[in-house]
């Protein structure tokens, strides 16, 4: 076996809820080790992947990882030719190969890519759906984080935002996670304007690009696609429908494809956000190495976890501080 993997139950600090899902107490991630390189993935049922499908994909991919591990572009193209989709599984492998290469060359990923580690943005911190009073309490507990992302997509959206604005004047991103109809989105976004919202993420259904376009043309806040964009090839169809795209490694299949999305989005004049699932510091730190290239970072998945096995990217007043160790640069907690 070339791919050694391990399943970890990440315990959540708070039960976490978004528009389309029930409350979760913990989330499973799969970490991999390939010739000393570390990767991680957090498969999402919404995108058709589970721990089981990732394990099956690893079995299929294992024989393709041989003496060619430095040629990450070639390896990832081979994986794609053998098995389409399965982006979460591919992301773990892509991440481990990048970590391995950075370690072999003795440089952090940001240096491998010629990026300025001082150019990282501040990350937002997500407040999951709950009763408005509990969301207010979560906002108070989020004191260290200078930007908040508020999950909406309920019959009580305005009530929630009003309650949150009573307790904070921080910049707020809103994420409806596909919950609104286009007309409902227009009505709600217009009503949200007085509450000083910085952007709206995925107001409507993923496949309804006309709906997104309708919302964008009838409102004034930046509209960021998340569930509507998985790969770079999805971007041209979104031009004119949204102002930006939210990249996630488990959606797109890894760091290589994430880099392609950034460049394709820029070529079309779109803004770029990089987001995450609930992941440990391993997956979050890998994504953080790309943040000198993005407008918005939403890399808080590890902050929602009580038993993070790793130490990697840290925060200073919300700004992402990249580790300067080789590769992704994470170490097991307790080793620092
Ligand atoms: Mg989102």
Image (spheres, rainbow, N blue to C red):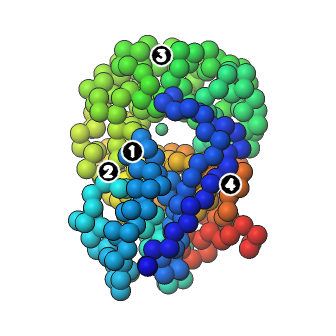
Q: Which residue is label 1 attached to?
A: 47
Q: Closer to the camera, 142 or 179?
A: 179
Q: CA distance from mark 3 to mark 4?
A: 33 Å
The earlier-in-sequence mark between 2 and 3 is 3
The earlier-in-sequence mark between 4 and 2 is 2
- Numbered mark located on residue 231 in the image: 2
**Is 39 situated above or below 165?**
below
- Numbered mark located on residue 315 in the image: 4
Task: Give residue 213's quadrant in the image.
Answer: top left
The earlier-in-sequence mark between 4 and 1 is 1
Camera-side mark, 4 or 2: 2
Camera-side mark, 1 or 2: 1
The earlier-in-sequence mark between 3 and 1 is 1
Question: Quadrant of the image for the N terminus?
Answer: bottom left
Q: Secondary structure at mark 3?
A: helix
Q: CA distance from mark 4 to mark 1?
A: 30 Å
Q: Secondary structure at mark 2?
A: loop
Q: Residues within 10 Å of mark 3 (few under 14, many from 20)?
A: some
> What x and y, as percent, mark residue 24?
61, 39
What residue is at 67 percent from the left and 49 percent from the top?
A: 11
> What x and y, as percent, mark residue 127?
63, 34
Q: Secondary structure at mark 1?
A: helix
- Numbered mark located on residue 252 in the image: none
Whether label 3 touches label 1, CB < 8 Å = no
- Numbered mark located on residue 188 in the image: 3
Q: CA distance from mark 3 to mark 1?
A: 27 Å
Camera-side mark, 2 or 3: 2
What residue is at 29 percent from the left and 29 percent from the top?
A: 208
């Amino acid at each position: 076996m070339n791919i050694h993997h391990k399943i970890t139950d990440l315990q959540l600090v708070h039960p976490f809820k978004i528009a389309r899902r029930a409350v979760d107490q913990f989330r499973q991630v799969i970490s991999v080790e390939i010739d000393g390189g570390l990767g991680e993935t957090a498969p999402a049922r919404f995108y058709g992947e589970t721990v089981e499908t990732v394990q099956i994909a690893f079995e299929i991919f294992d024989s393709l990882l041989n003496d060619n591990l430095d040629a990450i572009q070639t390896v990832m193209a081979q994986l794609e030719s053998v098995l389409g989709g399965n982006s979460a599984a591919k992301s773990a492998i892509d991440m481990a190969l990048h970590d391995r290469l950075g370690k072999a060359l003795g440089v952090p990923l940001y240096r491998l890519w010629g990026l300025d580690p001082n150019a990282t943005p501040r990350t937002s911190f997500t407040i999951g759906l709950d009763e408005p009073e509990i969301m207010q309490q979560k906002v108070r507990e989020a004191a260290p984080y200078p930007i908040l992302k508020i999950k909406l997509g309920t019959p009580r959206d305005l009530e929630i935002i009003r309650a949150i604005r009573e307790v904070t004047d921080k910049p707020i991103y809103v994420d409806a996670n596909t919950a609104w109809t286009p007309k409902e989105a227009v009505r709600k976004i217009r009503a949200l304007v007085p509450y000083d919202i910085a952007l709206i993420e995925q107001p409507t259904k993923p496949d309804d690009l006309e709906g997104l376009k309708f919302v964008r043309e009838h409102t004034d806040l930046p509209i960021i696609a998340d569930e509507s964009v998985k790969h770079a090839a999805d971007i041209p169809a979104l031009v004119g429908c949204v102002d930006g795209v939210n990249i996630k490694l488990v959606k797109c299949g890894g760091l290589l494809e994430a880099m392609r999305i950034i460049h394709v989005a820029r070529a079309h004049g779109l803004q770029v956000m990089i987001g995450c699932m609930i992941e440990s510091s391993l997956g979050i730190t890998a994504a953080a190495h790309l943040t000198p290239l993005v407008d918005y970072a939403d890399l808080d998945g590890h902050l929602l976890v009580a038993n993070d096995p790793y130490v990697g990217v840290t925060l200073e007043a919300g700004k992402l501080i990249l580790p300067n160790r080789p590769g992704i640069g994470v170490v097991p907690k307790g080793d620092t």
